Amino acid sequence: MSLCLRTLKIALSTVVAIFIADFLQLDSSISAGIIAILSVLDTRKTSFEIAVQRVISTLLALGIATVLFQLFGFSTLVFGLYLLLYVPSAYKLNVQSGIAPCSVLVTHLLIAESTSSGLLLNELLLMLIGAGMALLVNLYMPSKADKITDIRNKVEEQMQKILYQIDGCLQNGIQTDISDTELRTLDQLLEEGILLAHNEADNRFINQSYYSIRYFEIRKTQARILEQMQHNLKQISIPLLQSKILAGMYYLTAETLHEYNPGINLLEEIDELTRYFRESDLPQTREEFEKRAILFQLLNDFERFLLIKKDFFDEYRNELFTQNSSL
């Protein structure tokens, strides 16, 4: 949620909450506005969860306070005793988000030196109005679908750059250190994408989908494999015949990398390449043996890289076809 939108929501919900409380002639109507300020959160889901927690927390706080004030009277020490009982109880029931606003409501009882049913209802209504207005304004939550799609495209472009880089290294050997800049950029895009995808899912109560979250998660797993590949590449200083053949696989993957491509043909190519590696003549020198072992590790990592995407494609096959047909 942008700062501008959050500001507008806070201002609107606060003012309307106070107006409603005044219209109902509730005492301490400003408190309804304060509760609204505290209840405007980033997503519909969190706003709803916090609102429910705070209503439960209000009932708990008012119940404990009423018993203590009736038994021991209205004093600061009794209010302290209330906190000693209420705070751990709120945490135990997982409604600790209401500790601050609910304790403010309890101070109204302390100041009025009353636990009458009318005053208790007054405090409960303040909470319902404040939390309710925050929920109402949060019903409007602009979709981030276009932004998520844009980040997905950027992620794939970034992965293509890395695959092309690996292709070049395998073709020509490593003459200089491999830059990690592309991987860092990819990680930043993935973190941004995961955050937006979670927020988008939490803003949808109907037709909720975790596709985008899973997409960025599998790309993050693939990014770690690419990182391992780059680490192994740094140990290959000279190009070998097998490395040039493997380079072609990376180039082909970069050319065909796409959200809707399961990579089945590439996996078949890897099977053939694995057989070729095993049937090749044995290395003649220790150095060639070590380089060949690294290439074989690269091949295994590459297969894992593709299998992760294939498993994702199989899991979301229907949704992928639906998205693709709508383009």
Image: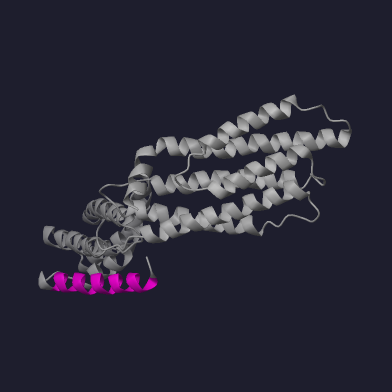
Along the viewing direction, whichever of 241 and 106 lies nearer the viewer: 241
Magenta span has 13?
Answer: yes
Q: Quadrant of the N terminus?
A: bottom left
In the picture, residue 287 is in which quadrant?
A: top right
Name the residue at 27% across, 47% down. Answer: 207
Location of residue 173 in the rendering, given as x and y in whole percent from the top left corner? 78, 48
Q: Quadrant of residue 199?
A: bottom left
Q: Position of residue 178 (x, y in %)?
A: 73, 54
Tell me which residue sits at (88%, 30%) in the image: 284
Q: Is residue 292 visible?
A: yes
163 relative to 110 in the view: left or right: right
- Tell me the residue at 33%/45% (across/down): 322
Task: Specify whether residue 271 is painted magenta.
Answer: no
Q: How is the image coloured?
A: one colour
Dominant secondary-structure state across the stretch colored magenta: helix
In the rendered image, the vertical position of residue 225 relative to residue 300, given as above or below: below
Q: Nearer the viewer, residue 14 or 114?
A: 14
Q: Horizontal placement of 166 versus 43: left or right?
A: right
Number of numbered markers: 0
The answer to whether residue 108 is above or below residue 279 is below
Is 295 left, or right, of 207 in this rendering?
right
291 on left or right of 33? right
Along the line of sight, the residue nearer the viewer: 254 or 2:
254
- Front residue of 98/253: it is 253
Report the span colored magenta: 3-22
- In the image, residue 312 sits, relative to residue 132, either above or below, namely above
Q: Which residue occupies 53% across, 35% down? A: 265
Residue 62 at what x, y percent from top left?
A: 23, 55
Can I make out residue 307 in this image?
A: no
Taking the view exactly as shown, the residue that stands out farthest to the top is: 279
**Where residue 156 sits: x, y (%)?**
52, 53
